[in-house]
Image: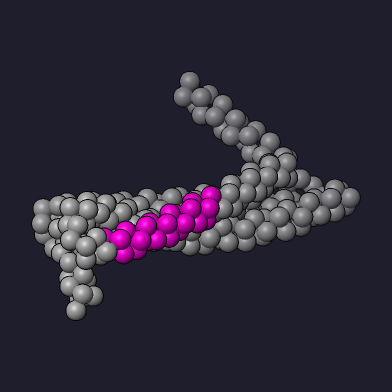
Amino acid sequence: MFKQFATLIRGRAFEASTVVMDRNALPILRQQIRDCAHAVEMSRKAVAVAMAQNEKECKQHKRLTQQIADLEARTLDALQKDREDLARDAAETIAHLEAERDVSTQAQARFDTEIARLRTVLREAETRLRQLQRGQRLATATDKTQRLQQVAPDSGLSTLREAEDTLRRLQTRQSEIDATARAMVELEATGSADNMRDRLAEAGCGKPLRSSTNDVLNRLKKKAKASGK
């Protein structure tokens, strides 16, 4: 008997909550759309921040490239004047700058990829938000019309609107979960590949990721000999 009473209480509570949701469907939908609009605005800001950071990285890359070119020209001049001591110090500096330039290049590539992904997500979100807003206007107009016609709250149209709201909530949640899962897989795969590449390079496997001091010096010596002929 006690179990039956408990079941009855749960059933009555569920029915009451369903009635409340039905009667307040439009206010709930309006708040949900406001939340969606805020999320879309945050996505726009995320794209803008990524673009600003990428622009900053591009300027850094340009500055490093100019510094390397200037130091190489001066180092060649030092070699022609038999100042190998200065040339070696300069070559070491160039090697460090080249490493920073290579990191900047990789950062720009990642920014480009992330900006493209964020733009795609933003476009999809904006499209869905506009659809929701159009649906809200239609639902509001329908609700006002039904009130004027004194349609019963348990009519077929009310049930249809409830089903549409439930479907929209389910689709929105599923899309967010899928987008998050794809982003996590992408980030994990990228991080894992980069880490493995760095570890292999440090162990001497494959082409080095950056030039050493001797590599730079030998290259500049060859340039100096070639220009001296």
Image quarter of the C terminus: bottom left
Q: Residue at the spot x=60%, y=30% of the render?
A: 13
Residue 197 lies within the magenta run: no
Q: Residue furthest front?
A: 81
Q: Is residue 139 left or right of residue 48?
A: right
Q: Is residue 209 among the parts visible in the rendering?
A: no
Q: Residue furthest right?
A: 148
Looking at the picture, tell me which residue is in the foreground, 98 or 167. 98
Q: Residue furthest top?
A: 2
Q: Residue at the spot x=17%, y=57% of the render?
A: 84
Q: Which residues are magenta?
A: 49-75
Vertical placement of residue 224 versus 64, above or below: below
Query: What is the x, y in percent for residue 138?
Result: 76, 57
Q: Residue furthest bottom?
A: 229
Looking at the picture, tell me which residue is in the foreground, 173 or 208. 208
Dominant SS of magenta comes to: helix
> Disc count in the image?
0
Query: What is the x, y in percent for residue 71?
Result: 32, 59
Q: Is residue 57 left or right of residue 83?
A: right
Residue 57 lies within the magenta run: yes
Query: What is the x, y in percent for residue 124?
Result: 56, 61
Which colour style is shown?
one colour
Q: Residue at the spot x=64%, y=55% of the render?
A: 129
Q: Residue at the spot x=58%, y=61% of the render?
A: 123
Q: Is residue 122 among the parts visible in the rendering?
A: yes
Q: Is residue 75 left or right of residue 135?
A: left
Looking at the picture, tell me which residue is in the foreground, 188 or 221. 221
Query: What is the x, y in percent for residue 134?
Result: 72, 59
**Res 160 → quadrant:** bottom right
